[in-house]
Image: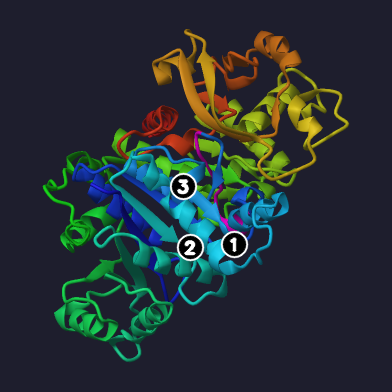
């Protein structure tokens, strides 16, 4: 069987959930026994989202091979349970960078380099790349932005060309639109969807299926109307009602026969009915928690929920595994002081201090960690959160009053967190951090070893600063143990406080690898400790 290609576009407005629809369809096809991957084409000119402010673009997701990618790749991995890579996220900036580099090298000598064919050819090459590996039966491609955007036009044109070039039955297009409800008129309006599809058709692309995001059921008559005026077959209009959880969407799409439409359109024969047993078990646990716990998320970017998307979802996975609902209380670290920290963290069963960059809000994180440590509240610090727990311990236990990270105080006499040696040699910001999966060796008598159940783990990283190894012995004597290190470099990856009920800081990002069917061991242990603390407090 040839590799099949499914393109997912969006219209009317952004943020409709193309990534969730793509991930849900991927999950359904995977559950039918097909090998599936999903890729995202983003229309912005940045090479990758690595240098974007989280308030601008949400979380930057990191893959095993060190790609800084769009947060939708996190959804892809969480739904499919398989890693993505550099090839799964392509931006306009990366396309133009490749073409311009080739032009400078003389690849187009004598030719005028243009959007068509040179830019569109490079887009098509990238769109087909994963399918040419022979690893996948179906490649799903999400086109970022909305149809009609100037910046998305080259991607839509490349998709049009591929629909023409690929063999019949090897390619199809799914278009996601908004069907709004006007409360003043008590009517559902289909006109925005009609205009969106017409705009796509003007670009030469005929959608095979239309998925309608809606707050109210459409009914057979409205579906028929959309099918008629958008020139798709009856039955190819799919209702996507707002769901109580994003993880319910695959079941909703299956009930609407989306996966069946796709396998029939692509001519995939002898396909199985989807086996969603484990997924349904997870949803059942998620929907019927036995307990509720309160967990604080202390961070710099909490005003935008998507800034910590993988952390938020890891709470969901771990909560379902532990039989509890995790009520997350977002606390802006800028607002935390020594005077108000007790009030800010009042009633919290556990506290996670989040990653971030820059000096803003770091003192607030230190105040929070000081309170957590002294009051026996379960603590998990990730990346910058781990670094700040080291600084807090140095100040308040080891007695080094000005101990800090050189990111916060370049002139500190005790730089317990310092810029990594290789980072001192580069002035470029994009793609130059310590990125991707690295090995970590855990001490056998440590809490970290007990949590993971193995001596060697691999977790993903995204940082420039590190625990300053020359202070490791002082911390060990003072009670804060380095329980996990990189076996090649000696870089401290995990610190923990054995005298505390649960106090763990990790340099890596465990949230990147958590999925509904395989929750992060570290998140699961943290949530269980928070649940135990809640029961104890009651």
Q: Residue 440 carries which label?
A: none
Q: Name the residue under label 1.
A: 44
* Start-end of magenta stretch: 53-64
- Residue 388: x, y in percent? 67, 32
- Residue 79: x, y in percent? 33, 45
- Place residue 422 in its image quadrant: top right
Q: Is residue 108 left or right of residue 7?
A: right
Q: In this picture, is 112 found above or below 274?
A: below
Going from N to C along the chain, the mark reached first, 3 or 2, is 3
Residue in the picture at 32% in, 74% down: 206
User: Viewer-proximal residue, 326 or 446?
Assistant: 446
User: Viewer-proximal residue, 286 or 12?
Assistant: 12
Q: Nearer the viewer, mark 3 or mark 2?
A: 3
Q: How many angstroms separate mark 3 from mark 2 (CA)?
A: 13 Å
Residue ranking furthest to the front? 110
Q: Residue 88 carries which label?
A: 3
Q: Mark 2 points at which residue?
A: 144
Q: Please indicate, yes or no, whether residue 16 appears anywhere in the rendered image.
A: no
């Amino acid at each position: 069987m040839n590799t099949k290609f499914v393109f997912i576009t969006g219209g009317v407005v952004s943020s409709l959930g193309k990534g969730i629809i793509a991930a849900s369809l991927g999950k359904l096809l995977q559950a039918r026994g097909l090998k599936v991957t999903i890729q995202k084409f983003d229309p912005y000119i940045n090479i990758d989202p690595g240098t974007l402010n989280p308030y601008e673009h949400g979380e930057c997701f990191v893959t095993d091979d060190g790609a800084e990618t769009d947060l939708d790749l996190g959804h892809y991995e969480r739904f499919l349970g398989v890693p993505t890579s550099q090839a799964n996220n392509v931006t306009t900036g990366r396309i133009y960078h490749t073409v311009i580099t080739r032009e400078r090298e003389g690849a187009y000598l004598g030719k005028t380099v243009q959007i068509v064919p040179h830019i569109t050819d490079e887009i098509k090459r990238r769109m087909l790349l994963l399918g040419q590996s022979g690893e996948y039966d179906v490649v799903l491609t999400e086109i970022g932005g909305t149809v009609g955007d100037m910046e998305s036009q080259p991607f839509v044109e490349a998709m049009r060309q591929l629909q023409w070039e690929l063999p019949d039955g090897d390619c199809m297009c799914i278009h996601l639109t908004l069907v709004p409800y006007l409360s003043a008129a008590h009517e559902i309006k289909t006109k925005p969807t009609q205009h969106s599809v017409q705009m796509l058709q003007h670009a030469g692309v005929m959608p095979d299926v239309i998925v309608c995001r809606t707050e109210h059921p459409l009914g057979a008559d409205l579906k028929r109307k959309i099918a008629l005026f958008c020139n798709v077959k009856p039955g190819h209009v799919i209702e996507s009602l707002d769901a109580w959880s994003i993880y319910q969407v695959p079941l909703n799409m299956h009930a609407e026969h989306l996966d069946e439409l796709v396998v029939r359109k692509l001519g995939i024969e002898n396909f199985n009915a989807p086996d969603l047993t484990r997924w349904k078990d997870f949803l059942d646990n998620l929907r019927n928690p036995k307990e509720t716990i309160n967990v604080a998320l202390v961070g710099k970017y909490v005003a935008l929920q998507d800034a910590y998307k993988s952390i938020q979802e890891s709470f969901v996975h771990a909560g379902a595994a532990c039989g509890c609902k995790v009520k997350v209380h977002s606390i802006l670290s800028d607002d935390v002081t020594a005077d108000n920290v007790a009030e800010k963290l009042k009633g919290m069963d556990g506290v996670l201090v989040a990653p971030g960059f820059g000096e803003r809000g770091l003192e607030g994180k230190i105040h929070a960690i000081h309170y957590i440590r002294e009051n026996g509240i379960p603590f998990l610090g990730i990346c910058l959160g781990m670094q700040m727990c080291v600084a807090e311990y140095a100040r308040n236990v080891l007695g080094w009053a000005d101990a800090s990270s050189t990111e916060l105080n370049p002139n500190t006499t005790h730089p317990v967190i310092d810029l990594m040696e290789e980072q001192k040699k580069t002035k470029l910001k994009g793609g130059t951090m310590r990125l991707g999966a690295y090995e970590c060796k855990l001490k056998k008598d440590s809490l970290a070893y007990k949590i993971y159940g193995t001596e060697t783990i691999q977790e993903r990283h995204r940082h420039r600063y590190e625990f300053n190894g020359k202070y490791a012995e002082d911390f060990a004597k003072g009670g804060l143990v380095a329980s996990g290190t990189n076996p090649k470099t000696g870089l401290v990856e995990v610190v923990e406080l054995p005298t505390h009920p649960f106090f763990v800081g990790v340099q890596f990002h465990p949230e990147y690898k958590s999925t509904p069917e395989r929750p992060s061991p570290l998140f699961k242990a943290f949530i269980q400790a928070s649940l135990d603390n809640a029961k104890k407090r009651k």
